[in-house]
Amino acid sequence: MPALQDADPLVAMERTGRRDTPRLDLALLVVGLVILWQAGTFLLGREALPSPLTTLAKLATIVGDEDFPRHAWETGRAFLTALVIALLAGLAAGLALGASRLSGEVAEPVLTALYSIPKITLYPVILLLFGLGISAKIAFGVIHGIIPVILFTMNAVRNIRPVYLRSARAMRLTTAQTAATIIVPAALPEIVSGFRIGFALTLLGTLIGEMFASQRGIGYMLVKAMETSDTATVMALALLLVVFATLSSAALLWLDRRLRRHALTS
Amino acid sequence: MSADHLRLTGVTRIYPPVEGHGAVHALGPVDLALRQGEFFSVVGPSGCGKSTLLDVIAGLARASAGTIAFEGRTIAGEVPDGIGVVFQEDASFPWLSAFDNAAFALRRAGVPEAEVRERVTHTLNFMGLMSFAGAFPAQLSGGMRQRLCIARTLVTRPRLLLLDEPFGALDQQTRLLMGDELLKLWRETGATILLITHSLDEAALLSDRIGVMSARPGVFIDLVETGWPRQRDSRIVSQAAFGEVTGRLWAALRDQSIKALAMAS
Amino acid sequence: MTRAGWIRLFLIAAALCLLEAACRLGYVSRDAVIPPTVMLQGTWRAIASEEIRADVLLTLQNVLLSLGLSLVAGTAGGLLLHRTPRLRRALDPLLASYYAVPTFVFYPLFIVLFGLNRWPLVAIGFLFAVVAVIINTLDGLARIPRALVRTAAVMRLTRAQYFVHIILPAAAPWLFTGAKFAVAYSFIGVIAGEFVVSGAGMGHAIAFAYNSFDNRMMYGLIVLLFVLVGGINTLLWTWERRLYARLAGR
């Protein structure tokens, strides 16, 4: 039975696209998308959907603006903090819950349910608890990102092939040795997959948090542009986010593939 | 007592009741005495408790009743020193090279690196794996991975080697050749070997003695001495005595197998 | 219920009791969190209110529309990509980063496209859910055992028969998982959209309650949402279990 995590978009993508992407195809695709975009601009008008060129120009202006580094740093600061918390706490919780069969069985439905809840509805609760400001943003990022990390880590530990653990016992390894030399390497590929998703979702959470709870940051810039119908800025920032997300995702994917290089099964 | 390398007395294993099932009497009572350096095989129908027997001897599971003595000392739920186990499934670690796999147990035991290298190189050469020392399990065939698992166990110089259907996933011809290799390393190391197999041919050809196990709960219903010379290999399949041994095994086993088949459905 | 189920129930009950105690004893500020029993009062009030019921209905309709569209488009898209491996491989890196971008920034764009009605919300939910369906469909199609494919060829099944009798049943577990994600993501997309810019629906009601400092109503609605989503998930889960039990021979 494919567990929820197995089918999660970001990881499932890994399995279906096994071979490395021919770069030419990707370039062609990007060109195709740009053409579609331009067509959209013609159809819907420049007010609604700024053209690719306009968007790029706007992006250059934004990035060149003296205020921008401040905003970027604000977002980056919150995101990185949230990421570290989500990854470390998620890893710890996942390892603890995955260690025993019972704890895993008890926790999984709860975690899966939390995963499916629109966390945006918890946003007022977060605001009430943390007030406006960076803590709320970090909290928001964490609640988005931590659950997949826990789920994936838990699953990784539970799915370790029993024969490895039996071998460890037959070789008379101590618990510490078993954990360090067998459990961690065996579970690592799946844990890293969880980290990849945690990364993406923490970014999303931080941005959303910024959109509501902050006077600074890229999320704030976004929401301001949305309110003033400054579609050019919205598109420019969206493009920036897409590029950032794609690049970091590709980097993490590369890391993931390197770690999976030795795995017998995908 | 005396020179028994491994002695089982009245060993029984009963799995406690779990949600939905009652208690399962999987094994025993089993009595068995292995001589030092003997090659002993266990054959029996599916589900008769052969693997349970191996788990209990290795100390991976506790006997519900009876005693197990290895080299005079009792085994009770803990894996003693001097025992090596090769499992049915491939247990090679995909994240380590063949060399590092083989060196794994020694390194964890704190053996000095120079000695580790020497012993691992010797064993890998012996098993014909040295040219693949840098390869990863994913790059090796199933047969080679199993040989790697055997090598990993051999490097620790076990005095008792337990093998649970180690060649199960391989084709017949590879199995015969692997059997030859097993005999070779048995002669070289002088270890006592307990092999679990569902192949009567394999048991008949490789062993000094064969224990035939009944359907669940498994007890020994026959012990067959083959009388083969120590220097033997797969070519003894052409001897008439081989057919007689196999025939005797099947005679004892056939009814048990029918019984086991009925139990499974 | 299984042992794990009882333990879970106990733990959740204990957590709620602790929260109740913490709130009533003043360890947690009443401005931030209210006791669970008071939350339930809010839920009751919400259900009793005709306006809220209309909001809930609206949200559910939007979710249903998003769900239906994403399932159809997602399955079709998955089938299409399965047949064109080149395109699929080229899309890989883009799809992998898809969920890192808050897609509801395109909400204003959709308002221009569709007008100030439910369709921008449905579009957001659709965008959120469709990719998950596509990916799971692809996964399921890729895992159909070759033996089944060849059996179908030997039996000389037509394309339609092949789809109905081989593809659907064999890929069912993954299609089901895709559907589960579609439900979750449709909810997320629609409610997030309602939250941000909308005059109606559950998301809007929650935001309104928050802005009016009506904590009781706000929490009441959140609880209601939890119950709704939880209920739908449990239904899906039970259905899925029965499906798997049959496949696993239990």
Image (cartoon, helix red, strand yellow):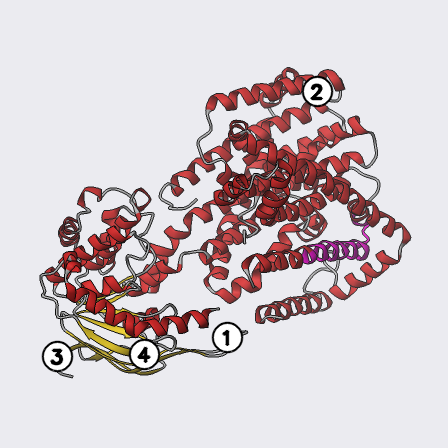
Respond whether the residues carrying marks 1 and 4 are from the same subunit. yes
Where does label 3 land, which residue?
B3
* Element carrying mark 1: loop
Which of discs 4 and 3 lies nearer the camera? The answer is 4
- Say whether mark 2 and mark 4 are on the same chain: no
What is the chain identity of the residue bearing mark 2? A
For the view shown, which residue lies furthest in the right direction? C50
With B107 as the anchor, is A102 left or right in this view? right
Amino acid, disc 4: Val
Asked which quadrant contains residue A99, the reply is bottom left
The residue tagged 2 is A40
Q: Is residue B49 left or right of residue B180?
A: right
Say which chain tag 1 marks: B
Say which amino acid is labelled 1: Val
- Residue B18: mark: 1
Q: Is C42 in front, or is A62?
A: C42
